[in-house]
């Protein structure tokens, strides 16, 4: 069996970490802007996977053979569907509670999450059972230094990297990004500066949802089966990654996600029970030792 | 006679920012001691340090000949230091009576088991707490509000309720954080006589933070002025009121 | 002189018990309805104990069913695998009570161990830690072969009958009520209202948060034990996150902070849930359409969202009925 820290595990860990990172970004951005743990975020990822599934059969029938174009359209569909659902959830469920106690929104988010999961499994066209995910791009394996690396590993990591770099550029360089940072610092001041706060919040949900949707597609391709409850576990793990990195902090979420991906892969290789439990152990340790996370900043409460 | 509370060389940093610098004082039992200074000069931080919400970076706080610097807030309160807050912290969804009872009760006296079994001892203790709390409300002219939810009381009454709640803990020293904030001139007059009455009737020492010059000059027996965390003047009200540094740092800004 | 007060709760409970028992022996209530009543009573304990943590003390636990799971597995292991009890043997009820109490105590101990470090966390963070705890508990049960692993613990003797469940529920509610309406309960309420102010009127807030958490866990453990001996099994999936959310819906529907609300909501939602289950099945049979049981949970989820959006304070708000409220002499 050898060491659990072999090249194969590292590759697997980075691959899982990429998927977690895309989900964690949405968690962290939404938290940064409205201080809400959006429980339904993992379900946006599930919606992305189903949207990709549907889009593939739709486009493949008409564009069969043109793998690249189909793959691109499938990615666009998954991101659009999840982004749209995220927007809708914000508008219908979270916005009316914006200035109510924080727990009200949290509980509502749990309700939204339950609704999406059970609604999808109740819908006859989707149903509660597993579906196998189509091979959108033919899978090929290559062996590098004892580790089997499929082209999916490359795709997962590359898609995540491209999206994350674009997000960083957006937040750092564009005026929209500047407005987002302003709203996350101080909503009232931002409003006084003429920023349309609700528009920025909607935009954040849209981006967060779209990223989760892309993660859903990648996960569907990589572990080729999907089901309505598939978002619960990765959603929780990604949330923990966001907390580990410092919730509200974008680079922190990415760092946390890769640490989580690697830790979980190594731990599972050692013992499956520890593999299941390690994420929560990490969460509890972080919250007890450094609740602000690795890259989070300390905030003082005003007394 | 040793002072009731002595603070020596107390300094506190928030990150790199020095909020309180080498603060010291000796408060005599039975006195009304005033602390003034512009907004952001570190006054409330000093109260937060005394009551244990923050631990000072340096320095020592002696209360009743005991070092309370590292003690937990609730222990400090049980030891005889009570306070009110600049922005009221009332238990809004509880009745005025319950606000007082919570401060009056001492958890050690009624065990969980006697509460569950409603023993005669427990019922007697409950009766005592209730009576003493109603008496306190009466003293603050709030007795007709006993059963009212605190959130339904007007602002002036809430201020008095908070003072009553602080007194309910049976303090030797009471810290009042800007008690006159938001009051009209008539209410300020009443507050001043209330503070003096409280001091005489409950035999408590009063440590007061206030912006309102009339209150400070009118009732304090000793005044300390701070700015940017540093003490710039102290002494009797008549002396401090004429200090040019005080006029510049404090009155100058406000008079503008 | 302390005037002797009529024990309203006791009298009301005795009347309710008598009426249900009479209706059952007259055949007006059948065994199926009685089973739903039994379940409702157990949900009363779960909702009331979660309300102590979330509603009274203002903390936020999302792993309440994890404690019920501990109670179910500990008591089930004792009666089934260790004592090997049989309800027909006289005296075995005594050991059953011991097993149920042991389940509650172990749950309380775990509650204490978890609560002590994690109750420093506020609101949403605490929610996540308790959720994580619930998931860890479930994973642990899933992996212990001695108690059946993923198959669950089967063949638990049926000790929970209407009388046993009714008495235990009555005692649990009475104890929780007496705690709430005492200095301890008021201390917990003050933490909910303003934790800092509570500490600064001399309340040891850490102690009371842990006390409330461990007490809530104790009663959840008791409820879990009753469940295991009613359904005659303990299964990891009975104690997952979505079950904890069902209890959460009960306390938010009834009113956070109202014991009366929790009792009413536990009955109403247990019957509603059963009604929905039967209604959906009947609808599917009648129309021949593929209408699955998941719709029940869709309705539950929408109910939760609507409560939060339109009736935040729930059925009772923080008010109590006269039966629950203890009169105070002036």
Image (tube, rainbow, N blue to C red):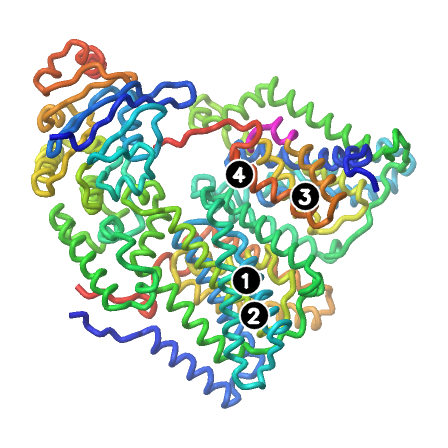
Question: Looking at the rendering, in which quadrant would you find the C terminus of chain A?
Answer: top left
Helix, strand or loop at mark 4: helix
Residue C186 lies, in percent from the top left, at 31, 54
Count the labels in the image. 4
Determine the image quadrant of residue B113.
bottom left
Residue C155 lies, in percent from the top left, at 66, 74
* Residue depth check, mark 1 versus mark 3: number of the one nearer the observer: 1
Disc 4: which residue: A287
Residue B59 lies, in percent from the top left, at 30, 24
Disc 3: which residue: A234
Do tag 1 and tag 2 residues touch (Cβ < 8 Å)?
yes
Disc 1: which residue: C68
Helix, strand or loop at mark 2: helix
Chain of the residue where label 2 is placed in the rendered structure: C
Mark found first going from the N terminus, 1 or 2: 1
Q: CA distance from mark 3 to mark 4?
A: 19 Å
Chain of the residue where label 4 is placed in the rendered structure: A
What stretch of residues is rendered in magenta? A247-255
Disc 2: which residue: C227
* Residue depth check, mark 3 versus mark 2: number of the one nearer the observer: 2
Q: CA distance from mark 1 to mark 3?
A: 26 Å
Q: CA distance from mark 4 to mark 1?
A: 25 Å
Q: In terms of secondary structure, what is the magenta stretch mainly? A: helix
User: Callout 1: 10 Å neighbours few (<14), some, many (20+)?
Assistant: many
């Amino acid at each position: 069996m050898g060491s659990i820290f072999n090249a194969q595990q590292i590759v697997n860990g980075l691959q899982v970490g990429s998927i977690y990172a895309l989900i964690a970004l949405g968690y962290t951005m939404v938290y940064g802007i409205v201080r809400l743990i959006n429980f339904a975020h993992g379900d946006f990822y599930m919606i992305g996977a189903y949207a990709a599934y549907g889009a593939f059969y739709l486009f493949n029938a008409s564009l069969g053979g043109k793998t690249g174009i189909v793959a691109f359209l499938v990615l666009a569909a998954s991101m659009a569907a999840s982004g749209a659902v995220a927007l809708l959830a914000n508008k219908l469920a979270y916005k009316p509670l914006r200035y109510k106690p924080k727990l009200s929104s949290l509980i509502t988010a749990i309700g939204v999450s339950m609704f999406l999961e059970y609604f999808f499994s109740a819908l006859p066209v989707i149903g509660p059972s597993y579906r196998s995910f189509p091979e959108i791009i033919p899978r090929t394996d290559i062996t590098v230094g004892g580790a089997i690396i499929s082209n999916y590993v490359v795709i997962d990591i590359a898609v995540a990297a491209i999206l994350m770099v674009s997000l960083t550029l957006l937040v750092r360089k564009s005026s929209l990004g500047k407005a987002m940072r302003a709203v996350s610092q101080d909503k009232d001041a931002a409003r006084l500066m003429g920023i349309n706060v609700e528009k920025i919040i909607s935009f954040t949900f849209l981006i967060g949802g779209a990223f989760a949707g892309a993660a859903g597609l990648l996960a569907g391709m990589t572990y080729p089966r999907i089901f309505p409850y598939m978002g619960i576990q990765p959603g929780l793990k990604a949330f923990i990654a966001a907390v580990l990195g410092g919730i509200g902090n974008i680079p922190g979420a990415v760092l946390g996600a890769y640490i989580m991906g690697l830790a979980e892969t190594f731990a599972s290789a050692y013992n499956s029970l520890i593999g299941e439990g390690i994420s929560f152990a990490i969460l509890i340790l972080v919250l007890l030792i450094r609740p602000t996370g690795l890259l989070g900043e300390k905030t003082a409460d005003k007394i | 006679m040793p002072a009731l509370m002595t603070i020596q060389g107390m300094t506190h940093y928030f990150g790199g920012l020095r909020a309180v610098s080498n603060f010291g004082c000796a408060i005599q039992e039975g006195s009304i001691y005033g602390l003034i200074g512009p907004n952001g000069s570190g006054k409330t931080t000093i109260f937060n340090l005394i009551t244990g919400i923050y631990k000072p970076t340096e320095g020592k706080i002696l209360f009743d000949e005991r070092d309370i610097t590292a003690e937990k807030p609730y222990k400090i309160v049980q030891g005889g230091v009570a306070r009110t807050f600049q922005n009221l912290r009332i238990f809004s969804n509880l009745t005025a009576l319950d606000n007082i009872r919570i401060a009056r009760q001492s958890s050690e006296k009624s065990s969980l088991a006697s509460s569950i079994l409603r023993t005669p001892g427990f019922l007697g203790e409950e009766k005592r707490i209730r009576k003493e709390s109603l008496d306190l409300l009466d003293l603050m002219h709030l007795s007709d509000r006993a059963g009212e939810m605190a959130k339904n009381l007007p602002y002036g009454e809430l201020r008095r309720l908070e003072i009553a709640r602080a007194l309910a803990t049976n303090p030797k020293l009471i810290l009042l954080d800007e008690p006159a904030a938001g009051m009209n001139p008539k209410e300020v007059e009443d507050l001043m006589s209330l503070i003096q009455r409280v001091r005489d009737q409950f035999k408590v020492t009063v440590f007061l933070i206030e912006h309102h010059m009339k209150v400070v000059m009118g009732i304090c027996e000793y005044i300390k002025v701070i700015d940017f965390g540093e003490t710039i003047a102290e002494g009797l009200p008549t002396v401090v009121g004429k200090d040019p540094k005080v006029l510049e740092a404090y009155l100058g800004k406000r008079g503008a | 002189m302390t005037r002797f007060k009529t024990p309203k709760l006791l009298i009301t409970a005795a009347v309710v018990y008598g009426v249900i028992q009479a209706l059952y022996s007259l055949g007006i209530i059948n065994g199926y309805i009685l089973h739903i009543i039994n379940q409702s009573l157990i949900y009363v304990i779960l909702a009331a104990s979660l309300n102590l943590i979330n509603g009274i003390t203002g903390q936020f636990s999302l792993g309440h069913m994890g404690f019920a799971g501990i109670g179910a597995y500990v008591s089930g292991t004792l009666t089934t695998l260790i004592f090997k009890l049989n309800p027909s043997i006289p005296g075995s009820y005594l050991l059953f009570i011991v097993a149920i109490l042991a389940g509650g105590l172990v749950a309380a101990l775990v509650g204490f161990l978890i609560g002590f470090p994690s109750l420093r966390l506020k609101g949403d963070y605490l929610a996540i830690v308790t959720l994580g705890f619930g998931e860890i508990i479930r994973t642990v049960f899933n992996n212990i072969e001695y108690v059946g692993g993923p198959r669950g613990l089967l063949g638990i003797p049926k000790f929970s009958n209407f009388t046993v469940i009714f008495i235990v529920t009555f005692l649990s509610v009475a104890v929780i009520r007496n705690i709430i309406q005492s200095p301890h309960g008021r201390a917990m309420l003050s933490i909910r209202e303003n934790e800092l102010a509570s500490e600064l009127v001399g309340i040891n807030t850490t102690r009371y948060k842990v006390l409330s958490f461990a007490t809530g866990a104790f009663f959840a453990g008791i409820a879990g034990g009753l469940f295991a001996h009613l359904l005659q099994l303990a299964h990891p999936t009975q104690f997952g996150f979505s079950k904890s959310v069902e209890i959460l819906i009960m306390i938010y529907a009834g009113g956070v902070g109202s014991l009366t609300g929790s009792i009413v909501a536990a009955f109403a939602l247990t019957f509603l849930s059963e009604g929905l289950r039967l209604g959906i099945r009947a609808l599917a049979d009648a129309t021949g359409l593929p209408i699955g049981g998941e719709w029940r949970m869709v309705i539950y989820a929408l109910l939760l969202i609507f409560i939060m959006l339109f009736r935040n304070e729930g059925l009772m708000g923080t008010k109590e009925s006269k039966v629950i409220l203890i009169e105070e002499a002036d």
